[in-house]
Image: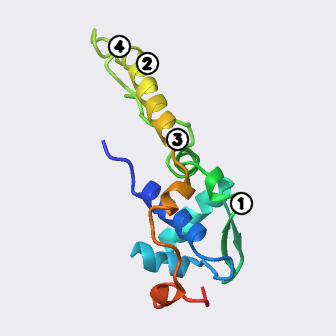
């Protein structure tokens, strides 16, 4: 099973916002350039991050800012903002197994504890990594090197 690409894109968005100095505007256009995707997709994910309480977005070309320090945002926060379904589940269960089958009638009951345990392990791991730790994996912001990718007109 593969999760969607929303999670790594959301992480990249947050890293960029945390990485650049406050006097640069981080817009969906700038983020789309870094992610190499359509700004519409970026705006959709930014909306999820905003709804998750991780960023604020200034209307127009005002850019985005983190709502709290990068060391206070974990990968679990990002995962919860962009990956969980409206039912708050990671793994879906079979909705219509055959109730006449000895396996089908109990599959969800038997499988759910294992899936719940797997989800908990994933969440425990994601909670240990912060955006700040990931930002530290990149060179410090250098306006000269970032020119063309990131400009002061963000």
Where residue 1 is drawn, which disc sits there?
A: none
Q: Nearer the viewer, mark 3 or mark 1?
A: 3
Label 4 or label 3, whichever comes before in sequence order: 4
| Distance of label 4 from label 3 (alpha carbons) | 38 Å
Mark 4 vs 3: CB contact within 8 A? no
Q: Which mark is residue 113?
A: 2
Q: Which residue is mark 1?
A: 67
Q: Which residue is mark 3?
A: 128
Tag 4: Cα neighbours inside 10 Å, few (<14), some, or many (≥20)? Answer: some
7 left or right, relative to 154? left
The residue tagged with tag 2: helix, strand or loop? helix
Mark 1: secondary structure? loop
Distance (Cα) linking label 3 and label 1? 19 Å
Give the CA separation, mark 2 to mark 3: 23 Å
Element type where label 4 sits in the image: loop
- Which tag, 2 or 4, sits closer to the chain's start? 4
State which tag comes first along the sequence, 1 or 4. Answer: 1
Spatial CA distance of label 2 from label 4 is 16 Å
| Image vertical order of residue 122 relative to residue 44, above or below | above
Residue at image coords 43%, 58%: 8
Looking at the rendered image, the quarter that the N terminus falls into is top left
């Amino acid at each position: 099973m593969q999760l969607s690409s929303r999670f790594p894109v959301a992480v990249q968005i947050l890293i960029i916002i945390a990485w650049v100095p406050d006097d640069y505007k981080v817009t969906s256009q700038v983020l789309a350039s870094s992610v190499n995707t359509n700004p519409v997709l970026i705006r959709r994910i930014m909306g999820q991050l905003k709804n998750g309480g991780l960023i604020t977005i200034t209307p127009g070309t005002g850019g985005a800012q983190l709502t709290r320090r990068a060391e206070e945002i974990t990968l679990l926060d990002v995962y919860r903002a962009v990956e969980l379904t409206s039912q708050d589940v990671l793994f879906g269960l079979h909705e219509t197994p055959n109730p006449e089958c000895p396996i089908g009638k109990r599959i969800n009951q038997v499988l759910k504890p294992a899936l719940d345990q797997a989800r908990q392990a994933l969440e425990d791991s994601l909670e240990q990594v912060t955006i700040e730790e990931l930002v530290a994996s990149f060179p410090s912001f250098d306006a000269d090197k970032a020119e063309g990718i990131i400009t002061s007109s963000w």
